[in-house]
């Protein structure tokens, strides 16, 4: 026991030293163990840990109250909606300021939204703005112009700048976003969108400080694209408008947030400092919490987490989430190196989906007994939406689907071959390192598919940055996925499979699915709209199967509720770092 205690103490000491602590450093009021942040550029964000930080650094027009779901004021102090539901007029707070003291204006929002609409940025959330009049057509026009420019025989600074001036003029004349004065933003939609205010509060629609961004941006004469250097998001450079500001950021080590003294909104920071500590190893995160150096483990993924839950500890919290844990099938005809992709065949995808015993996964692998999923949209989570049935576990049907696609065990060696005797290609499975739960699920899936279908695997575990690059490049056959809904509508999940969507890493495309989503957008009757969306989900969950849903997410947090306050427990888990504070600190007591 003495040696064990000494080793634990040494590990904690080394851990603290690796985070850059020293004898004279003051501990942050709240310290959060989190996955590493990829970017602080709000228009480029995708991952939950990035979006969580963005909620503290940037404030949009409005946001959804994390406890009630009601839309509350942000930079906009009020807004009005036209009788036909197509025109929104936002009135901005006249005292809104950037962290450097500059006045925040409607033009800051307008140009941030224009930036999000540029295909140059390759942003995952550009489609959130497509409901705006002219936005989709502008995106398509700019894409076509850049493609045409790339095909030209010669490029020049002058030609690239001329195309940019034409792009700005086209945006001004065709896209329904106007700033008639510094404190008014007018947005015109193609048709009424019932969840539009929810979208307006999403982090990718946050404003950006134009002078800072312009210093780090240029028009590339070789491509005519706007290129922005990442230096604009560094400490001492980043200008933000949220309740907190970026005080320090040591990549892969720590990020320190402090109250923004220029913030005049309704939701100021409640702690003097919040530190984000990226800890890749899940067990180390628990160790850091137990030592008192971490206040909140924001995603408890240690292999022994089910044991922690069973122990009945009051600092281990199992929370239902508005999200679905899934794996993605690469639906592209070929792999990046030109090899045929067997998962381009929907019959193969259905075979792999039907061969997964999801009940066994949640009982014996995760041991958290999450509700299993056969659909992407969590059933019962959205009023008026009826989920389809989806595909269930049926190994005989799975083998029949694979045989219909031409793959059978023709020589009784336990592996399936095609009519030419060629074995099914080794399945390339991709997932990020650092999450024991994902590792355990991957191992279980490999065993189910190997034993049930007769296929072999090449399992590839990669660091987050490199795994993300492979996902976008289609360099996988099966990859770990997952999605938390961004707003309360089925499209927050269904849009993942729309052709060309920035989050469609599967490369899936089906004109029937796209047409159903388009019909739903035009539907005037809310009930008819929901029926069309049900039909769309049925198509991808029972026939096309680009995504294999496993179970509904439950999120595990580790924190002491008697000490740390401000954590939201509703399914959307819309955490606001500026709300966090510890009892006995400088903030007043508040309910968790």
Image (cartoon, rainbow, N blue to C red):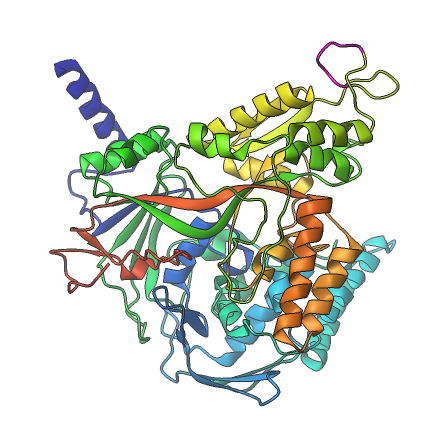
Is residue 36 visible to the viewer in this orientation of the structure? yes
Q: Which of the image's four quarters has the C terminus? A: bottom left
**Relative height, residue 411 to residue 168 (above, below):** above
In the image, residue 70 lies at what x, y percent?
40, 72
Is residue 470 on the magenta stretch?
A: no
Q: Quadrant of residue 435?
A: top left
The quarter of the image holding the N terminus is: top left
> Which residue does the image show at 81% across and 54% down from the upper left?
150
Stretch of the chain drawn in magenta:
411-416
Q: Residue at x 29, y 56 (%)?
A: 567
Q: Is 171 located above or below residue 38 in the figure?
A: below
Quick check: 495 above or below 399? below
Left or right: where 48 falls relative to 550: left
**Residue 135 seen in render:** no
Does 1 sit left or right of 567 as displayed?
left
Q: Residue 411 placed where, x, y %?
A: 80, 10
The residue located at (77%, 16%) in the rendering is 409
Q: Position of residue 557 (x, y in %)?
A: 32, 44
Question: What residue is at 28 percent from the left and 34 percent from the top?
Answer: 310
Between 577 and 254, the one lying in front of the other is 577
Secondary structure predominantly adopted by residues drawn in magenta: loop
Whether the magenta-drawn stretch holds residue 412 is answered as yes
> Picture coordinates of residue 182 (x, y %)?
49, 85
Please tell me in which quadrant of the rendered image residue 569 appears. Answer: bottom left
């Amino acid at each position: 026991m003495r040696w064990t205690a000494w080793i634990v103490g040494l590990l904690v000491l080394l851990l603290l030293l690796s985070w850059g602590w020293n004898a004279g450093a003051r501990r942050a009021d709240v310290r959060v163990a989190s996955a590493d942040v990829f970017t602080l550029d709000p228009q480029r964000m995708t991952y939950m840990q990035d979006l969580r930080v963005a909620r503290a650094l940037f404030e949009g027009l409005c946001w959804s109250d994390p406890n009630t779901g009601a839309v509350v004021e942000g930079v906009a102090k009020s807004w009005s909606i036209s009788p036909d539901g197509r025109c929104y007029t936002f009135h901005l707070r006249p005292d809104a300021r950037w962290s450097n003291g500059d006045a925040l204006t409607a033009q800051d929002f307008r140009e941030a939204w224009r930036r999000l609409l540029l295909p140059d940025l390759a942003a995952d959330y550009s489609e959130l703005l497509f409901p705006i009049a002219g936005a989709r057509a502008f995106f398509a026009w700019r894409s076509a112009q850049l493609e045409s420019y790339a095909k030209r025989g010669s490029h020049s600074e002058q030609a690239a700048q001329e195309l940019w001036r034409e792009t700005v003029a086209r945006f001004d004349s065709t896209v329904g976003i106007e700033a008639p004065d510094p404190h008014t933003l007018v947005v015109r939609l193609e048709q009424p969108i019932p969840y539009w205010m929810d979208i307006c509060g999403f982090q990718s629609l946050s404003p950006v400080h134009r002078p800072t961004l312009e210093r780090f941006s240029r028009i590339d004469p070789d491509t005519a694209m706007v290129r922005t250097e990442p230096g604009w998001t560094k400490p001492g450079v980043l200008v933000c408008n949220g309740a907190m500001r970026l005080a320090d950021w040591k990549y892969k080590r720590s990020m320190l947030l402090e109250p923004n003294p220029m913030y005049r909104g309704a939701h100021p920071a409640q702690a003097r400092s919040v530190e984000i500590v990226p800890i890749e190893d899940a067990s180390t995160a628990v160790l850091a919490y137990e030592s008192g150096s971490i206040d909140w483990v924001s995603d408890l993924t240690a292999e022994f987490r089910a044991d922690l839950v069973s122990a009945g500890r009051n600092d281990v919290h199992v929370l239902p989430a508005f999200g679905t844990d899934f794996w993605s099938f690469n639906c592209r005809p070929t792999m990046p190196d030109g090899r045929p992709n067997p998962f381009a065949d929907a019959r193969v995808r259905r075979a792999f989906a039907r061969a997964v015993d999801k009940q066994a996964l949640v009982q014996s692998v995760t041991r958290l007994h999450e509700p299993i999923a056969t659909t992407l949209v969590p059933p019962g989570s959205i009023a008026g939406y009826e989920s389809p049935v989806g595909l269930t576990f049926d190994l005989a049907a799975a083998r029949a689907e694979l045989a219909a696609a031409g793959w059978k065990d023709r020589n009784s060696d336990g592996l399936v071959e095609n009519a030419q005797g060629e074995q099914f290609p080794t399945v390339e499975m991709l997932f990020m390192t650092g999450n024991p739960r994902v590792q355990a699920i991957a191992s279980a899936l490999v065993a189910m598919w190997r034993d049930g279908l007769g296929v072999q695997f090449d399992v590839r575990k990669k660091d987050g940055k490199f795994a993300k690059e492979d996902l976008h490049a289609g360099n996988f056959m099966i990859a770990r996925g997952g999605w938390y809904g961004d707003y309360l509508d089925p499209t927050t999940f269904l849009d993942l499979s729309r052709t060309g969507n920035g989050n469609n890493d599967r490369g899936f495309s089906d004109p029937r699915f796209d047409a159903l989503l388009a019909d739903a957008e035009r539907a005037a009757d809310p009930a008819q709209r929901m029926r069309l969306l049900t039909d769309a989900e049925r198509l991808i969950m029972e026939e096309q199967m680009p995504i294999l849903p496993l179970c509904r997410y439950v999120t595990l947090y580790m924190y002491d509720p008697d000490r740390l306050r401000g954590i939201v427990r509703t399914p959307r888990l819309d955490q606001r770092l500026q709300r966090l504070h510890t009892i006995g600190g400088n903030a007043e007591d508040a309910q968790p």
